[in-house]
Image: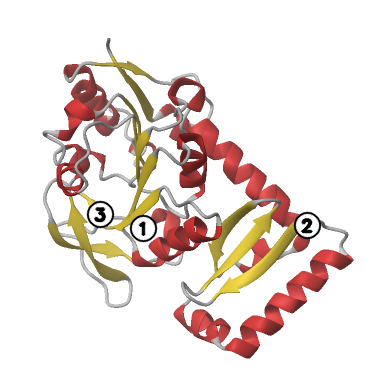
Amino acid sequence: MEVVGRIFNAPITAWSATVMFHLLSRLSGVRDADYFYDRVERVWIVQSHDTYVAVGYRISRLWPWVVHRLVEIKLTDSRDYWYLNRHEPRRGSIIFDVGAGDGVDTILFARSAGPDGRVFAIEAHPKTARLLRATCRHNRLDNVSVIEAAVMGTSGSLAMTDEDNRDGNRIVRGSESMRAGLTTRIEATTIDAICHTYDISHIDLLKMNIEGAELDAIAGMTNAIAKVRRACIACHDFLTSNADEPIKKAITTYMTSNGFEVFTRNDDGRPWARDHVHCVRNS
């Protein structure tokens, strides 16, 4: 992927490919969609109407007949995954987007919070953080602060997988080997530390989607948990097919003991949706 990035970062290659996809779009009759290469972050951007999404090097996503549908699906899925009929952010909200990925969730949060609100978009993996920064910049999300770090129980440095499938990259744990070229070093912080640094008095919505590190993250919010009003935490028990659901149960217990009413969608046909824990602080 880095080789592809270097090739496309050459001005003539990036310009030529952009022109090619632009022409394909027009010849296919697609309107209000476009493509261009962001040489700052070295990623491709797709545009559908007034929304921009960074897609990295996934060239298949640039074909004209996919772009509108791609963006529409990603935004619809984002709204559904975080169950925003229950967590709809209001104007002026402070939102923590932990595990922001390519920034699609961040777009929805930032637009809902408005110019008086603030979104802290936190992403651990360096390559994915490039997508996030590009998405935020091209959508002019001025109320977003991007933080490139893993959210854990303590601050420091740790290892993370570096696979081509960026959505599945995760923290490398104790006995797991660090394979050359397939892992990368990242910085870790805590939600408590972020609240202290930015002087956060409350968190209207805490969204968390960090590929199995949920229990590590809540260990680092001893003080911050009292600031949270609503939360949606994506547990990842479905990845291990563990019938005991240890992460979901632990998160549910933790949030309930800290004064939240907890909701789940246990009848949803999608296992990842069933493992989302939705929380609203009791009045």
Q: Distance between the residues labelled 1 and 3?
A: 12 Å
Q: Position of residue 176 (x, y in %)?
A: 20, 61
Q: Mark 1 points at which residue?
A: 169
Q: Where is residue 40 in the image (x, y as percent from the top left)?
A: 47, 75
Q: Name the residue under label 3.
A: 150
Outermost residue to the top: 283
Task: Please name the amino acid that badge 2 sits on.
Answer: Trp
Task: Please name the amino acid that badge 1 sits on.
Answer: Asn
Name the residue at 81% across, 70% down: 24
- 224 with respect to 70 (left or right): left
Q: In which quarter of the image is residue 64?
A: bottom right
Task: Kindly identify which numbered label has been placed on residue 65.
Answer: 2
Q: Are marks 1 and 3 in contact (CB under 8 Å)?
A: no
Provide the secondary structure element on which disc 1 rests.
Answer: loop
Q: Position of residue 173 (x, y in %)?
A: 18, 56
Q: Distance between the residues labelled 3 and 2?
A: 36 Å
- Badge 2 crowding class, 10 Å Cα cut-off, few under 14, some 14 to 19, many 20 or more, is some
Q: Are marks 1 and 2 in contact (CB under 8 Å)?
A: no
Provide the secondary structure element on which disc 2 rests.
Answer: helix
Foreground label between 1 and 3: 3
